[in-house]
Image (cartoon, grey):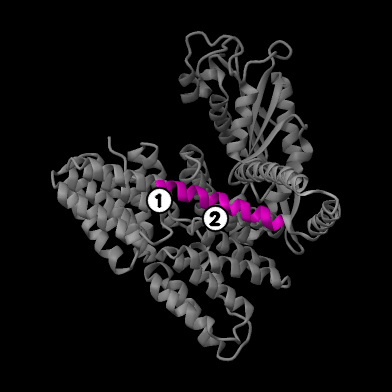
């Protein structure tokens, strides 16, 4: 089956926090006019990016513009420049935002959080992934300290953009999928839908060959784009649907959708989206036997992005051009275009390396390093007075080799730091500081690996913990109070568990604990201990508190002690049974429940137990436990 690469969209907070960005700025002459102009710029950023650039430039021409208003306007300018393909301008604007934030330490923390998040997304759209990752790490630290809804929105942005890095630069679509799923769950938890996030999820699923799931995400993205009036994303969604139709052999419908999308993208303008759509149209034309037309369409796609920062779209257009030239039998042209494609890919790689080297150079120019280098230079000058020309040349060569070796080591350390930073950002839930679901999955896989077992008839046990009436807390006191509850409960949970236990935020208001080598009675005792440790008064707003309780469900793995293989031996099966036990505990609330498999299930299958655990308890195949 043919696969089509689609242009991905770095997610900025603009799509999620437009009301916050449009809040009144500090008092200034004609502040209402300035506010209205900034609001208009934000509205135009995606629907008419060039108009947004022009409007932002006119706003920034005022010397009396307050710093917060200037940062908001730069945010609009950088985002619009990135969409228009002016990567140099976008990166320059992101640097200005970062400098303004650093020069004004008195800015409110939530505003700083949003400003730096925007700057990171703008760097990302300009292809400056190293600078983007550096800002993402800084924003993540601020979010942990700030808390509240802004921290959740920031987490959504971090997860989405880190997912894009995994998908576009590290060739890890499976990791990207997990990041997108977590971001989507948080977005829905806030009662929102984001067309850009759904579109990126769909594009990644196309990369993985999961076309049916990709189509579902595209349909949701299109509905969301229609509701919010996001013309740019709607056109890209329809183009992506055309790619799936072409891959399935329906070239007629694909051609109609592509022509419709291209017309919209040309008018916006959206050069990256238009180039991607033209590249797919070239493929459709080639498959239909229109070889010369396919070549002209591929060349037109290349013209749209030739002098822009849209490297992925340039690669896609060149690949379409190579395919069309090959279909026409133009061997020399294929070789020339292939060389051009290779040169473009090498240039992109060099640019990423130059980002890291520029950061390294900046670090080497701090005050302490400068003084040390000056001392070494002076010492070298004194020694050189007594050396002849040959000796001087030899020493210079040795010193140069030493510096090159140090630079190579430093470069390697910077690369290591970059990848470690990305792993850390992907591994921790920024609100609670606990490992996230993806990290916990890896820890559970390690726990389930074959190893020397504990005492006879002990098994690893999974506990799922859910906060009772959590939705009422959010509805009555706001998401900030809900965040406080999650943070307080995570601290209690860490204190109640052993260092060797796996403790993670599993999703929403649900937490996971995994303990190694417990017996049935011990598991019940741990469930009761967790219930008691997590119950208690929690302050929701100043002067107001309420009693917090939790429900706990648990199950062991392997679920049947005499069965070491098959579905019932894994932790995923235990999770499903623990979830059913949790459902039973939620009926009473402030309670726990668990299921414990017998030594030998006999003729009862694992699915039988999942479908009817109550019947399995009555049959004596499994034991049901509950308390208090």
Rendering coords of residue 33 (x, y %)? 51, 87
- Residue annotated with mark 2: 157
Question: In the current view of this chain or complex, which residue is farthest to the left?
Answer: 289
In space, the residues marked 2 and 1 are separated at their CA atoms by 21 Å
Question: In the current view of this chain or complex, which residue is farthest to the bottom?
Answer: 29
Q: Residue at x 37, y 63 (%)?
A: 227
Comparing 172 with 232, the one in front is 172
- Give above or below for 451 relative to 320: above
Q: Main secondary structure of the magenta part?
A: helix
Asked if the stretch drawn in magenta spans residue 349, the answer is yes
Is residue 133 among the parts visible in the rendering? no
Q: Residue at x 73, y 29 (%)?
A: 526
Say which element carries label 2: helix
Comparing 107 with 123, the one in front is 123
- Give above or below for 125 relative to 176: below
Residue 522 as seen in the image, left or right of residue 285: right
Rendering coords of residue 218 (x, y %)? 35, 50
Residue 312 is tagged as 1
State which tag comes first along the sequence, 2 or 1.
2
Q: Which residues are magenta?
A: 343-363
Is residue 351 among the parts visible in the rendering? yes
Rendering coords of residue 354 (x, y %)? 57, 53
Comparing 212 with 118, the one in front is 118
Asked if the stretch drawn in magenta spans residue 137, the answer is no
Q: Residue at x 61, y 60 (%)?
A: 149
Say which element carries label 1: helix
């Amino acid at each position: 089956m043919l696969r089509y690469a689609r242009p991905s969209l770095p997610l900025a907070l603009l799509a999620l926090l437009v009301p916050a960005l449009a809040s009144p700025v500090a008092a200034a002459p004609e502040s209402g006019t300035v506010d209205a102009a900034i609001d208009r710029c934000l509205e135009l950023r995606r629907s008419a990016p060039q108009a947004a650039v022009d409007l932002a430039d006119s706003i920034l021409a005022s010397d009396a513009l307050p710093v917060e208003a200037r940062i908001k306007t730069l945010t609009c300018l950088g985002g619009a420049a990135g969409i228009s393909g002016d990567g140099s301008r976008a990166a320059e604007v992101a640097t200005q935002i970062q400098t303004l934030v650093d020069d004004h330490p008195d800015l409110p923390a939530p505003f700083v959080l949003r400003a730096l998040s925007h700057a990171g997304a703008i760097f990302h759209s300009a292809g400056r992934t190293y600078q983007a990752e550096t800002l993402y790490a800084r924003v993540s630290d601020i979010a942990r300290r700030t808390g509240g809804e802004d921290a959740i929105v920031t987490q959504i942005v971090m997860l989405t953009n880190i997912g894009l890095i995994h998908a576009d630069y590290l060739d890890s679509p499976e990791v990207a999928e997990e990041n997108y799923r977590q971001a989507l769950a948080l977005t829905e938890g806030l009662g929102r839908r984001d067309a850009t996030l759904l579109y990126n999820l769909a594009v990644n699923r196309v990369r993985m060959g999961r076309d049916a799931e990709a189509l579902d995400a595209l349909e949701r993205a299109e509905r969301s784009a229609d509701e919010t009036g996001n013309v740019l994303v709607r056109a890209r969604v329809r183009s992506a649907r055309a790619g799936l139709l072409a891959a399935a052999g329906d070239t007629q419908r694909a051609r109609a959708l592509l022509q419709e999308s291209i017309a919209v993208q040309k008018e916006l303008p959206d050069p990256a989206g238009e180039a991607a759509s033209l590249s797919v149209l070239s493929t459709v034309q080639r498959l239909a036997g229109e070889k010369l037309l396919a070549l002209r369409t591929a060349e037109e796609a290349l013209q749209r992005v030739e002098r822009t920062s849209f490297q992925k779209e340039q690669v896609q257009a060149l690949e379409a051009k190579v395919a069309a030239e090959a279909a026409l039998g133009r061997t020399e042209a294929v070789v020339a275009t292939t060389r051009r494609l290779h040169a473009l890919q090498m240039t992109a790689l060099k640019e990423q390396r130059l980002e890291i080297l520029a950061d390294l150079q900046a670090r080497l120019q701090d005050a302490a390093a400068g003084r040390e280098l000056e001392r070494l230079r002076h010492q070298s000058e004194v020694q050189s007075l007594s050396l002849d020309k040959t000796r001087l040349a030899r020493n210079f060569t040795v010193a140069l080799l030493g510096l090159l070796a140090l630079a190579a080591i430093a470069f390697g350390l910077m690369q290591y730091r970059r990848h470690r930073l990305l792993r850390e950002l992907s591994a921790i839930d920024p609100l609670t500081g606990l490992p996230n679901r993806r990290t916990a999955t890896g820890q559970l896989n390690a726990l389930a690996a074959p190893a020397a077992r504990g005492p006879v008839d002990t098994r690893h046990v999974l506990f799922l913990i859910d906060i009772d009436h959590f939705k009422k807390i959010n509805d009555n006191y706001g998401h900030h109070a809900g965040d406080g509850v999650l943070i307080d409960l995570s601290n209690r949970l860490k204190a109640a568990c052993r260092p060797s236990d796996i403790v993670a935020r599993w999703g929403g208001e649900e937490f996971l604990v995994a303990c190694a080598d417990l017996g049935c009675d011990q598991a019940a005792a741990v469930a009761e201990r967790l219930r008691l440790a997590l119950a208690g008064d929690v302050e929701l707003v100043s002067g107001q508190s309420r009693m917090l309780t939790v429900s706990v469900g648990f199950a062991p793995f392997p679920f049947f002690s005499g069965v070491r293989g098959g579905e019932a031996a894994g932790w995923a099966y235990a999770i499903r049974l623990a979830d059913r036990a949790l459902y039973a505990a939620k009926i009473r609330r402030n309670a726990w429940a668990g299921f414990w498999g017998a030594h030998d299930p006999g003729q009862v299958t694992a699915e039988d137990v999942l479908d009817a655990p109550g019947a399995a308890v009555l049959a004596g195949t499994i034991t049901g436990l509950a308390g208090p």
